[in-house]
Image: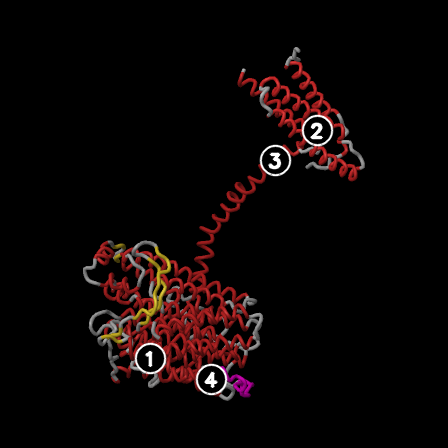
Amino acid sequence: MNSYDLSSLLIVALPLLSFVLIILLSKRMKPIVAGLIGTLTLATTAVLALYVAAGYFFGFGMVNGTYVHHIAMQFQWLKFSDNLSIDLGIVLDPISVALLIVITVISTMVHLYSLNYMNGEEYFARYYAYLSLFTFSMIGLVMAVNIFQMYIFWELVGVSSFLLIGFYFTKPSAIAAAKKAFIVTRFADLGFLIGILMLSHGAKTLDFFVMIQRLTQAGSPYLTHFTATSFLGLSTLSWALLLVFAGGAGKSAMFPLHIWLPDAMEGPTPVSALIHAATMVVAGVYLIARLFPIFAISAPEALLIIAYIGAFTALFAAVIACTQTDIKRVLAYSTISQIAYMMFALGVAGWGQGQTEGFTASIFHLFTHAFFKALLFLGAGAIIHAINSNEMKDMGGLRKALPITHITFLVACLSISGIPPFSGFFSKEAILSAAFHSNLSVYYVGLFTSGLTAFYMFRLYFRIFWYKPVQDRHNHEKHTWAMNSALLVLVLGAAFAGLIPFGSFVSATGGTLALPFHPAFSILPVSFGLIGILLAYLFFAKKSDRADRTVTYFGGFYRAAYHKFYIDEIYLFFTKKVIFNLIGRPAAWFDRTVVNGIFINGTAVVTEASSEFIKPMQSGKIQEYAMFFLGGALLLVALLFIQFM
Amino acid sequence: MEQVPLSHILILSSALFFLGIYGFFSRRNIITMLMSIELILNSVNINFIAFNKYLFPHQLEGVFFTMFIITVAAAEVSLSIAIIINLYRRFNTIDIEDTTTMKY
């Protein structure tokens, strides 16, 4: 075991260790000690991750000009049959290493930031324990060698997000949000599990790399057998992959399973940053990227469906984001929209020469998005921390009060809007270029959405930092060193992460890929972004009635978007009216009358009546008992007598 | 010397046995009931001795069994007396009719 393998083992083990340590000792130590343990452990993990990444990308990862996957550790955990077993292990390949950097760095920043943000909370230590658990689950997920190992960590991510979203467990809305997140993702995970079972049945293995090899080679018996049967025009393999995608769509909040994400805002803001930037929502993208060769080679029609769902979700969420007034909600919908970008980037990618650009673009966008979205959320957290409100109407003119937050928020907004030279520009260009070369309708949706993105992000920016100033003007940032430093570190990533030549590190085939960069191509998306910013400036830079007039002009459409297109109401209608009346009520009736009435109460009634009947025999008179005894003995004698006479 | 026939002895033991049964059911005094039980046990002892003597004169199982029964009866009596003393302390009587609190 060389030092890289050891470090990658430590990357998984350290957050778990920190979780165990903090949760066991949380009553014995001072809260700040727990915070420092969590932060320092994660900082160590981040350093190790960078070390492993450097080693992988510039050293042992490259074999004969392509990046190959490197199994740092693997052992058999559960064996079902001779060729089907659940292994636990650690794999290093371009996407897992890229994700490792994202997760550990963002999580470290969130840990650091929370030292100030959560200061004085009653369950401060427990909060840090949960953060560590969350990070551990996500690291385990990206390093999985086996699809079932991934599923285990996938569920762990679900549990820890449940714990963190419901962290303020005395607030009913937080409990409701935590339950909603858990139930919606669990529902999606059912699809994932069925997909895993189908894939493992078809490929006769659970190992990712063996599975990919067996299901992509032309003429492999597994593949021909798997694609031989079809249902509703799609092969069994496509259905299995679509079910796997359903799991990914649940975690990554794709329409129509996106409903949990905006409500997850009930958790502490740094947790939102972690969920939205580095963990949880990118898990779905990572899952599709992990199985990408199977999708691209053997089931391109499934990939097409993913592309359309992604494109629709991107537009849909962006429209809703334009109308929300809770700043965290705007950011939540922007996350859904950006994750959808990554999804459709994967969807438009293919396997052939020159078609894999979307794959690299997707992971690239995941990488840059993590930095600017974490920055946006942590900035929003700083604003909420300062003025104790999530609502836009309580904000305005906060430039003086929060100078550091102002600058970093601006950089993040420019980045997400795709304005050069910030990081979001490069990754978004790559995605749009991939879409342009493969599917024009998706490209136009993406293009329009990027304009909307710029509009709603700058609506947020102008509304918070410009507009009509609120009374409170003193500097809020003096006592929040940890929050400020987290913002300042992340702003570097948000500004410069795009300059990384990502194509030479991450590609679908493992080889290097030059991401095309044409200034002429960029003109259109960038000008869409600038138009969005200009509109936002006109509407929100100063207090005016322009925005209200436009709202009146759009009327019903605005109201529909403001109410999130009534998706929640549709779900409620479906669950409360349809499922509740058709399944819940009969089940409750059956439970009350048959199970409870006949089986349980019936048994009790019979027992009671018969005991009432035989109770007088217990009279307390010894001689009566003896009489029964004697009677019994005589009866036996009589029986024997009859028997033998 | 002519032996007493077996049937005489069996009649004696049956008479003792049913005297014991009768006493057990008709007396209300716990001590008397205990004495009735002793009668029952002793009637059984007589049976054992008699059968041993008349059917298997060269063996001693019946005699041994009898000695066991006497031992057990002695132990049982000591326990019963202890129980009766406790009953007396609790109820101030040793009449079986008055000690009927162990019921439903």
Q: Which residue is mark 1?
A: A54
- What is the chain letter for disc 1? A
- What is the chain letter for disc 2? A
Residue at the spot 21% in from the left edge and 63% down from the top edge:
A217
Question: How far, Cα to Cα, is label 2 from label 3?
Answer: 26 Å
Q: Which residue is mark 3?
A: A609
Badge 1 local density, few (<14 within 10 Å), some, or many (20+)?
A: some
Q: Looking at this rendering, what residue extends furthest in the top direction? A: B2
Q: Circle 1 — which element?
A: helix
Q: Which residue is mark 4?
A: A485
Camera-nearest label, 1 or 3: 1
For the record, the magenta segment spans A470-485
Q: Looking at this rendering, what residue extends furthest in the left direction? A: A219
Q: Circle 4 — which element?
A: helix
Camera-nearest label, 3 or 4: 4
Amino acid type shown at disc 2: Gln
Q: Is residue B34 left or right of residue A173?
A: right
Question: How far, Cα to Cα, is label 1 from label 2?
Answer: 94 Å
Amino acid type shown at disc 1: Ala
